[in-house]
Image (cartoon, rainbow, N blue to C red):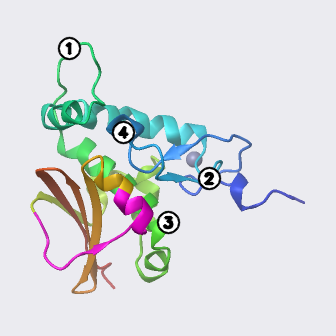
């Protein structure tokens, strides 16, 4: 019989593990030191999987420009990566899932985010998930992190917001002048 607690099971792939990897909800490379998940909630395998596409996104030209402003870009000149829909979709889906897990847990009970979790676990193709990604802003949205984390993220140019509309969940990631929206459609009955 297992005596392992909740912290030994990865919230993404659901595998038991004994690692104490720190998972940054917003990538560390954007200057985030504080908005993290409790040690052990995400296993090293998942953490490594996320790192690959996070790197692709934060090393793209629009992200690099803003990171330079906040002094968190690499000092050496780097060739910007191409910001692809797929990597960006993963990037946003991960921040959506983890920020909700951390700060707005009740939304996890109200929405079927299993397809998102399975996608993040590498078990489902992201193109099969019922979500829409676009650039833009949403009106009357609500902050996800609590006031302390909200303030700290704001100091590195980031805001995470959500809105419930037509039975679906709308998530927005704002990075200074860049603003992306990820819309999770209501699951078909
Ligand atoms: Zn995992």
Mark nearest the camera among 3 and 4 is 4
Of pointers 2 and 3, the one earlier in the residue sequence = 2
The local secondary structure at tag 2 comes to loop
Horizontal side of 109 relative to 65 (left or right) equals: right
Q: Residues within 10 Å of mark 1 (few under 14, many from 20)?
A: few
Q: What residue sits right under mark 1 in the picture? A: 77
Q: Residue furthest right?
A: 1
Q: Is there CB contact under 8 Å for labels 2 and 4?
A: no
Q: In the picture, residue 149 is in which quadrant?
A: bottom left
Q: Is residue 112 above or below residue 120?
A: below
Of pointers 3 and 4, the one earlier in the residue sequence = 4
Mark 1 and mark 3: Cα distance apart in space: 36 Å
Q: Is there CB contact under 8 Å for labels 3 and 4?
A: no
Query: In the image, residue 75 lies at what x, y percent?
Result: 27, 17
Q: Is there CB contact under 8 Å for labels 1 and 3?
A: no
Query: In the image, residue 116 lies at what x, y percent?
Result: 39, 61
Q: What residue sits right under mark 4 in the picture? A: 31
Q: Is there CB contact under 8 Å for labels 1 and 2?
A: no
The residue under the point 43% across, 78% down is 107
Q: Which quadrant would the N terminus be assigned to in this image?
A: bottom right
Name the disc covering residue 10, or none: 2
């Amino acid at each position: 019989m297992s005596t392992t607690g909740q912290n030994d099971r990865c919230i993404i792939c659901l595998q038991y593990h004994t690692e104490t990897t720190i998972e940054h909800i917003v990538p560390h490379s954007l200057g985030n030191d504080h908005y993290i998940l409790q040690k052990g909630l995400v296993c090293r395998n998942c953490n490594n999987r996320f790192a690959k596409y996070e790197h692709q996104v934060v090393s793209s030209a629009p992200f690099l420009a803003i990171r330079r402003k906040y002094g968190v870009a690499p000092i050496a000149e780097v060739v910007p990566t191409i910001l692809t829909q797929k990597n960006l979709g993963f990037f946003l889906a991960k921040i959506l899932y983890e920020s909700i897990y951390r700060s707005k847990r009740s939304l996890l009970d109200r929405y079927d985010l299993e397809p998102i979790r399975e996608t993040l676990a590498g078990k489902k193709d992201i193109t099969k998930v019922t979500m829409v990604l676009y650039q833009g802003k949403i009106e009357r949205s609500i902050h996800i992190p609590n006031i302390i984390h909200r303030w700290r993220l704001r100091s590195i140019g980031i805001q995470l917001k959500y809105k419930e509309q037509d039975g679906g969940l709308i998530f927005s990631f704002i990075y200074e002048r860049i603003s992306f929206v990820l819309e999770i459609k209501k699951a078909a009955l």
